[in-house]
Amino acid sequence: MEKALTKVNSLKVGSLWISKKAKEEFSNITEDINTISNTVEEKARWVFNKLKGKPLKSLPDLLREYNLPPGLFPPEHNLL
């Protein structure tokens, strides 16, 4: 009888361990799918913006990035 109880308890522990590992794997798979989805969305947006001809950064941001003064181009030439 004691052997049977030990066997049942070990099966329960094993079952709990398997359940925990399965939940961890599902969580990891979900994270991977979300990461892939976000990456695809970002790249699709990038391609769409390239096709539209829309710059990814505004002129003031580009000027700032290259340490150029904000008034470098007259306002009538700022078409963005």
Image (cartoon, rainbow, N blue to C red):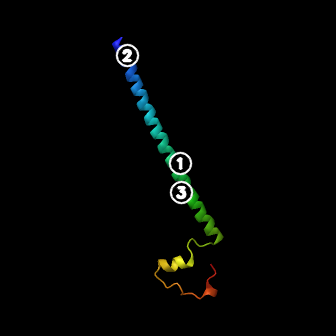
| First of labels 2, 1 by sequence position | 2
Pointer 1 local density, CA inside 10 Å: few below 14, some 14–19, many at least 20 = few
Q: Secondary structure at mark 2?
A: helix
- Between label 3 and label 2, give the one nearer the viewer: 2
Residue located at (46% from left, 81% from top)? 67
Give amino acid for label 2. Leu
State the residue position of label 1: 33
Q: CA distance from mark 3 to mark 2?
A: 51 Å
Residue 72 lies, with reference to residue 22, above or below; the image says: below
Give how far apart the Cα atoms at labels 2 and 1 are: 42 Å
Q: Which residue is drawn at the image coordinates 43% and 27% (left, top)?
A: 15
Question: Which mark is on residue 39?
Answer: 3
Q: Amino acid at mark 3?
A: Thr
**Location of residue 14 by image quarter:** top left
Q: In 3D space, how far apart are the residues under numbered discs 3 and 1 (Cα atoms)? A: 10 Å
Name which quarter of the figure residue 17 lies in: top left
Q: Amino acid at mark 1?
A: Ile
Q: Is 35 displayed left or right of 11 in the figure?
A: right
Local SS, label 3:
helix
